[in-house]
Every structure is written in structure tokens, then in C-alpha cells.
Image (cartoon, rainbow, N blue to C red):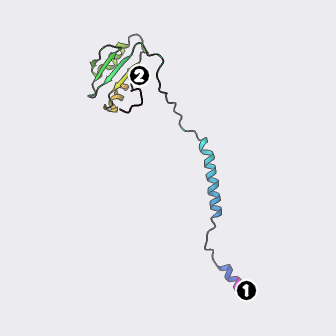
Amino acid sequence: MAATVSRARRRRTMNEINMVPFIDVMLVLLIIFMVSAPLITTGLVDLPSVGKSRQQPEHVIQVIVGTDEKLKIKVDQLEPESIPANRLAERVKKAQGRDATSPVVISADKNVKYEAVVQVMDTLQRAGIQRVGLAVKSGASSN
């Protein structure tokens, strides 16, 4: 009778899965990922800092994009004059004269489509104008 009892115990199937080895493996993988994640280098982008410049440039050319997406050019403190988009690069180069490093600032109303501003910037850059920037409102107001 003792032999039949021991055989019955041996034939019984295991109803539970031992989770301890599974948990050990998961913890080891977690530690490996936690240690290696900071070592992975992502794309490094050097963003420009925003601040006031110490000295404003003497000669500034301003391209104004109105709400109707029509362009005006303002050289220094003179009155802005309307200009067609196809003559923009030519007019800016003429305003720069011999100094090709004169800054060109694009001022656009906040209701103008982003695409219109990008097209103006692209036109200027394709013409070989080196210093093209965007005018922003200084201050913390959200208007």
C-alpha cells in the first residue's frame, strides 16, 4: 500500500508556475535598461539663446508681412514701401549695398500663415542673404 501512495504523489501534475525565476529575469533586464538608457546619445541640438543684444546694428532692413500677406520693406527709420514678392530679394540686396552682412529682420503679424513667413525667409536665403532673422515681441505678455 505504501508503494501505491508514493506513485500517486509522483504522478500528480504541478498546478502552479514558479514565478520567482521570471521575476528575477525581469528585474535584471530592468536594471540593465536603467543603466544603459542614460548612455544612449540622442541627436544633439544646439538651440540659440534669446536675449537682448548689447548694441543694436546701425543698418537694419525690415521685411514686413501684413495680414493680407503683402510685403513691405523698411530700411532703417524710413517709411515702409510696398514691394512685390518676386522683387523682394533684389530690393533687399540693393538696400544692403556693399555690406552683405547687414541683418534682415522679418516682421509678421501673428495672424499671418506660417507658410507665408517661411516663403519670405526661403526667398531671402536662396538669394544668398546671410543674416535673416525673425522679429518677436519682447516681454512676457501673451497678446
Q: Does the magenta stretch include residue 15?
A: no
- Quadrant containing the N terminus is bottom right
Disc 1 secondary structure class: helix
Left/right of residue 50 with respect to residue 15 in the rendered view: left
Left/right of residue 136 with respect to residue 35 in the rendered view: left
Amino acid carrying label 1: it is Ala
Amino acid carrying label 2: it is Val
Q: Which residue is drawn at 60% across and 49% down?
A: 33
Between 7 and 141, the one nearer to me in the picture: 141
**Tag 1 near tag 2, CB within 8 Å:** no
**Does 30 appear above or below 141?**
below
Residue 140 location (% of width, % of height): 42, 31
Q: Quadrant of residue 25?
A: bottom right
**Does 94 appear above or below 23?**
above
Disc 2 secondary structure class: strand
Q: In which quarter of the image is residue 103?
A: top left
Q: Mark 2 points at which residue?
A: 132
Q: Which residue is drawn at 37% across and 17% down?
A: 61
Residue 12 location (% of width, % of height): 64, 79
Q: Residue furthest top?
A: 98
Which class describes the residues within 10 Å of circle 1: few (<14), some (14-19), or many (20+)? few
Q: Give the range drawn in magenta.
A: 1-6
Which class describes the residues within 10 Å of circle 2: few (<14), some (14-19), or many (20+)? some
Left/right of residue 38 with respect to residue 81 in the rendered view: right
Residue 87 location (% of width, % of height): 30, 19
Q: Earlier in the sequence, mark 1 or mark 2?
A: 1
Q: Residue furthest bottom?
A: 1
Between 53 and 15, the one nearer to me in the picture: 53
Q: Residue at x 34, y 19 (%)?
A: 89
Q: Mark 1 points at which residue?
A: 3
Cα distance, mark 1 to mark 2?
Answer: 94 Å
